[in-house]
Structure formats: structure tokens, C-alpha cells
Image (cartoon, helix red, strand yellow):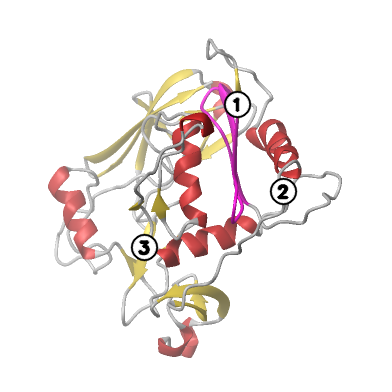
Amino acid sequence: MGLGGTGTNLITLAAMYRTLATNGQYQPLQLLQNAKPVVSKPLLSSASSWIIFKTLSEISAPDRVVPSIRRQIAWKTGTSYGYRDFWSIGVSPDFTVGVWIGRPDSSPVVGYLGATQAAPIMFDAFDQLPRDQHQRIKPKDVVTKTICWPSGRDKQISPLAQCVSQRKAYTVRGITPPTLETDGRFLRPTLDTVQTTWPKRLANWQQQRGVISTPKEQGEPKKGNAQVVPYIKQIVTGQHYYKEQLDVLPLQTLDENVKVDWYVNNQPFTDNEIKLVNYSGKVHITACINGVCDKREIVVH
């Protein structure tokens, strides 16, 4: 849902983004001529909505003439798979503006992006609105702290050797956010080492549903002749890749110290990356360690 892979419409999307300026309270949008009293319900906590609003409002706007009203706008853009929808949603303390650009028959418009097509219209719409009368107030349970990167742990409870790189982060009730690795997987640092592991409850949930084939206590040293189970990093089944946007796709597994046998479309593959120019349509990728395999299926355009 965070990547825009689920279907929605402009009214629903705008109403959900509006919660960033209403302390996390969701209210369905209504046309002015049919306005009726509505009951709000919590979607986000006040702390979460403030942090997200603050983060998105610090994104630089596209190059444009400086508006007469310099308002704080939390904004986000999106481009759907296949260049079919181009979105931009902006939220100020008093107003929410949503823009959708696309064709009624859902045919693609290659070269369009939400950031270059929808966002300028959204900011132009904000320029026509009156000045905001309210401002977002930081909740008392949101505190800025120094964290260690990439563990995400509070500097005050981290050994000096594990805190070479330091950054600022918003915390909620003193809890620092989990680290998000560059390949998009949430990891949590262990208490006594630099090594990071899946949260135990998440690891158990994954194993029970067959989502990921990894040792039950991932991150622990393997004992005896325990089977090493491969897990392909970065590549996600069902993902669409476009040759004009990406040249190569790296082939990596979580355990980089073990010999891995790679197969592409069921044929042995010895390179450490796939050149997308050589493929089109569905591509099957398999990684095997001593006969135990992990598989992915992607689509190349």
C-alpha cells in the first residue's frame, strides 16, 4: 500500500492524507453542497501524524514562482505502474489538495511523472487558497534524539564503538524508530552485537505462513550441520522492471559467505548481476545452496 500497489481513488486518498493535519483523525470528505456533520475516527496517533507531516513538509517544492502566501505544505507524489496514473497530494494545516492526471481508458502516458505533471498543478491550486488560520503543534511525546546509524539505537544506550555515525531522529515516548536498510527490509539491532536480526515475532509469523525461508532464530551462528537456507535480497516476486529506468539487477542473498548456485529461466547463471536488456517478459530467478532454493518471478519491460 505504501508503494501505491493497491487501487484507490482521489477522494479516498485525499481524505487519508488529511489525517496528517488532524492529529491522525480520519473524516470522509464531503462535497460542500451536501455537507453534513461527520464523525472522525483515529487512523494515526497524534505523534505519528505530526512526524509524517513534518517530514513531508520539508521536501523542496518544484521550481516555481515564489507564492504570495508561504504556507507549510506536506506533500507526496506518485506514478502508478505502467505510467497510467500521476498523483500529487498536499496537506496544509487548513487545506488538502489532491490532483490526479491520467486517461479515462487507463492507457499509459510514458514519460509523465506525478512529480513533474501533478505536483505543479497542486501547488498552483494552493496559491489560490486563503491563508491558513491554524498551525501544527508538536505533541509533547515527540522528542528529537541523537541515534546511531544504521542501528537506529539511542546514542545514550549504545557502545561508543557502535556509534561512529550519528543522526537526529524524532522519537515517540523515547522509542527510536527501527532501521530501514537500503534494500527495504526492517531490521532491529541485537543487544550485544552490531549484527541485526528480524524481530522475533515477525520471524515467527514469516515461518508460520511460509513467507520467508530463514532459520527460526535468524542472525544466530549456525550449529553443527544445520542447513543454510538461501533468501534472495532486493528482488520481489511480481515486481515490474523497465529497461529505460534500470540497466542491471544485482544477484545477492542474505548470507554472502556461502556459495550460491544461480539460475535464470531455469538455466545456470554465473554472473553476479542480470542485464535487463537481454530479457523481456517474465523472468524466473532461482538461488540454491546445497539443493535448497529460493525463487522469484519478475516482469521486464
Residue shown at 42% from the left, 68% from the top: 177
Gap between marks 1 and 2 measured at Cα: 45 Å
Gap between marks 2 and 3 measured at Cα: 44 Å
Quadrant in the picture for residue 180: bottom left
Q: Which residue is mark 3?
A: 187
Mark 1 or 3, which is nearer the eye?
A: 3
Q: Which residue is mark 2?
A: 130
Q: Quadrant of the C terminus?
A: top right
Q: Residue 272 at what x, y percent from top left?
A: 49, 42
Residue type beneath disc 3: Leu
Residue closer to the observer: 31 or 257:
31
Q: Which residues are magenta?
A: 74-99
Q: Residue 110 at what x, y percent from top left?
A: 65, 20
Q: Which residue is mark 1?
A: 243
Gap between marks 1 and 3 measured at Cα: 30 Å
Residue closer to the observer: 144 or 111:
144
Residue 95 colored in magenta in the image: yes
Residue situated furthest right in the rendering: 65
* Residue 216 visible in image: yes
**Measured along the vertical axis of the image, is residue 71 above or below residue 121?**
below
First in sequence: mark 1 vs mark 3: 3
Please name the predominant secondary structure of the magenta segment in the image. Answer: strand
Residue type beneath disc 2: Pro
Circle 1 packing at 10 Å, graded few (<14), some (14-19), many (20+), is some
Q: Quadrant of the N terminus?
A: top left
Q: Residue 201 at what x, y percent from top left?
A: 19, 61
Circle 3 packing at 10 Å, graded few (<14), some (14-19), many (20+), is some
First in sequence: mark 1 vs mark 2: 2
